[in-house]
Amino acid sequence: MGALSVNITVLIRDFLYETGRYLLFMRQVFRKPEKWRLSVRQFFTEAGKLVLNSIPLIALISVFIGAVLVIQTSNNMTSPFLPKMYIGYMARESLILEFCSTMVCLILAGKIGSNISSEIGTMRITEQIDAMEMMGINSANFLVMPKILSTTLLNPLLTLMSFIVGLFGGYLIVALTGMIKVSDYLQGLRFDFNGYYITYSVVKTAVFSFIISSISSYCGYYAKGGSLGVGRSATKAIVMASALILIFNLILTRVML
């Protein structure tokens, strides 16, 4: 019992330390930029690198997930009393409520999170960040704020794209296999549509994107221990971001629905 209590105390102390350091890091990140022009330029650079480069991956995954959802729903709807249009309806609801926000962001936590953490971690290990600090530059603001803003503001567009591509994937499998009539699938997509679910999904994506970019930046910024430390920071960033996404998914679902 004594060893257990010591371990719990250490965990609580480490949690409070990391939380406090993260909050101080965020305060440093969101200070007023010294040169807005450089920050705006960096914003568009990060948008292309982190968001636009993710489009092919998200589109590929979404089209296959949409097709798989339609197949699974069709195989489980064996009752002749259920209209076939509910296959399209259930695929649409599954995509917009969970996959296009939560699952896409879990995927992005691996892709974007490792990218951000490795990039900033390498700059820390090679003392580039130290050089910026010696020149009087707020390195956290210059390096991190454009990443956070670009992903938080633009990743919701990836959610909308994923939703559309996923529905198209369902349409393709229906048209190619003939498991149900295309007209029934399209009717299900239009049936009892709730526009608020789009808002719910977009808000979740924005929150999750902030978590991914800020946590990954934090882990990379305080990386230490050479190249192995960069790898450890990337792994830590992915694990922490994924865990927080699941926690905040529960909170936002309870609050917004």
Image: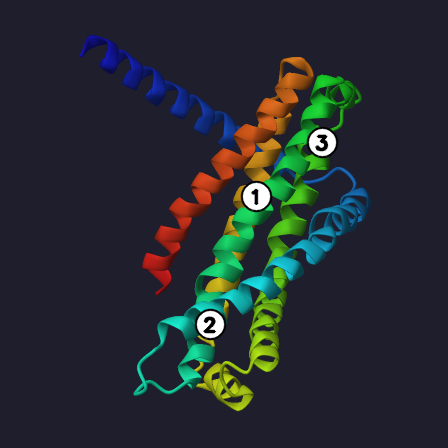
Label 2: how many Cα within 10 Å (few below 14, some 14–19, many 20+):
many
Residue placed furthest toward the bottom? 183
Which mark is in front, 2 or 3?
Answer: 2
The amino acid beneath tag 1 is: Ala
Q: Mark 2 highlights which residue?
A: 91
Q: Residue at x 63, y 13 (%)?
A: 225
The numbered mark at residue 109 is 1
Precedes in sequence: disc 1 or disc 3: 1
Tell me which corner region of the image, top left, top right, bottom left or bottom right, holds residue 126: top right
Between 27 and 105, the one nearer to me in the picture: 105
Residue 217 lies left or right of residue 186; in this view the side is right
User: With respect to residue 165, does 4 lie above or below?
Assistant: above
Precedes in sequence: disc 2 or disc 1: 2
Residue placed furthest toward the left? 1
Q: Is residue 60 visible?
A: yes
Dividing the image into 4 quarters, which one contains the N terminus? top left
Label 3: how many Cα within 10 Å (few below 14, some 14–19, many 20+):
some
Dividing the image into 4 quarters, which one contains the C terminus? bottom left
Q: Mark 3 highlights which residue?
A: 119
Tell me where residue 175 appears, x and y as whole percent.
60, 81
Residue 205 lies left or right of residue 44; in this view the side is left
Residue at disc 2, secondary structure: helix
Q: CA distance from mark 2 to mark 3?
A: 38 Å
Tell me where residue 206 appears, x and y as whole percent.
54, 55
Q: Tell me, yes or no, whether the two marked residues, 2 and 1, touch with CB atoms within 8 Å.
A: no
The amino acid beneath tag 2 is: Ala
